[in-house]
Image: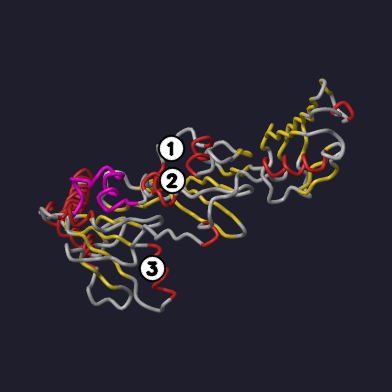
Amino acid sequence: MKKSLLIVVVAALMSGCTIPRAAFKSSLMSQDSPQYHLVDVTSALTVKDAEVIPETRLDGVFLTPDWPWAQLTQGDRLHITVLSSGGAEYLSGPSNGDRVDFEDILVTGAQTVVVPYAGTIPVQGLDMTQLADEITRRLSRVVLNPQVLVTLSARTGAMVTVQGGGGKTGRFPVDSHINRLSHVLAMAITDNTGGEMTDISVTRQQQTFRVRLADIDRLPQHDIALQPDDRVTIRPVTAFVTVLGAAGVQGKHPLVTRHASVIDALALAKGMDDALADPQAVFLFKHHESERAKQHMRKPNIYHVDMSQPDAVFRARTLMVDDGDVLYISNASLTDFAKVSAAFGAFLSGGQRAL
């Protein structure tokens, strides 16, 4: 009699209780909600707003012809040799009979060089052969039959700046043979295994070209020709997806590829909890898409994936996951029964001890 009375009392008390749960039940999701659109992920679904691979476009400033590498530029250091049939000893500098060498001749910021007896010579637009011809013309008034040879000692003016947190930083030289973006990145980046999540940007004349490191290898048109004074920035991309509910490991998981799908997110969370998850109730909340929907005064989409079907893996692979997205796995209905049974048993065992 006492046991029956105890059961009745316990049942009455529990009837007013709420079953504890960490989030909402899947049964609360409605197709006609005024707050959102519930979209079932099928093989025919295309999610335009969820596209995470933006088209990379080149501004015209990056499509200019190759830099005239033969032309002299500020910072270049030259070695000038003068040969003559006579009179070379009158030239300043160390001479050896009818030969004289001028070392470390600097191309100044004004795009000029100063050569003894030849004076100050503008070099903008000139290459070494043209400069040698100009020096020869000027020295012909001083020495007999001058022959001039100009060679490049150091090209310290033609350099690009590499900055950021994904590799070596500093100033790197470029010339007619080493002037592609991939050439400089090969010198700056020692580990390119994370190419999918490494952002490369090149700034020139206040215009910026941005591309992922992996795309430079995959698409040759993105391996642009660099110019002196370009600025290359290397930035590791950090992106996370949050997995909640009946997952193997709940939490914020870093994405290792920009092409991540719902399947990848589930794998990062160690799959679904076999004892708790409802495979028919997997939902994706897309952060950037909801922000755009808010700006355009329209309802956001919530994507529903039924993982209980054999073809669910193929359908889940078509739905991309981006930074800030939330993947929620609902508990199975049977878990409510298990929670009630456990609570009911705890009440009964406690009541029996009291009696």
**Camera-nearest label, 1 or 3:** 1
Q: Position of residue 20 (x, y in %)?
A: 28, 56
Q: Tell me what residue is drawn at x 32 percent, y 51 percent.
A: 260
Q: State yes or no: residue 264 in magenta.
A: yes
Number of marks = 3
Q: Position of residue 207 (x, y in %)?
A: 57, 60
CA distance for labels 1 and 3: 33 Å
Q: Are marks 2 and 1 in contact (CB under 8 Å)?
A: yes
In terms of image quadrants, where is residue 53? bottom left
Q: Tell me what residue is drawn at x 24 percent, y 62 percent.
A: 25
**Which residue is denoted by mark 3 in the rendering?**
290
**Which residue is denoted by mark 2 in the rendering?**
213
Q: Amino acid at mark 3?
A: Ser
Q: Earlier in the sequence, mark 2 or mark 3?
A: 2
Taking 75 as reference, is 329 above or below it? below
Q: Amino acid at mark 2?
A: Leu
Mark identifier at residue 192: 1
Q: Earlier in the sequence, mark 2 or mark 1?
A: 1
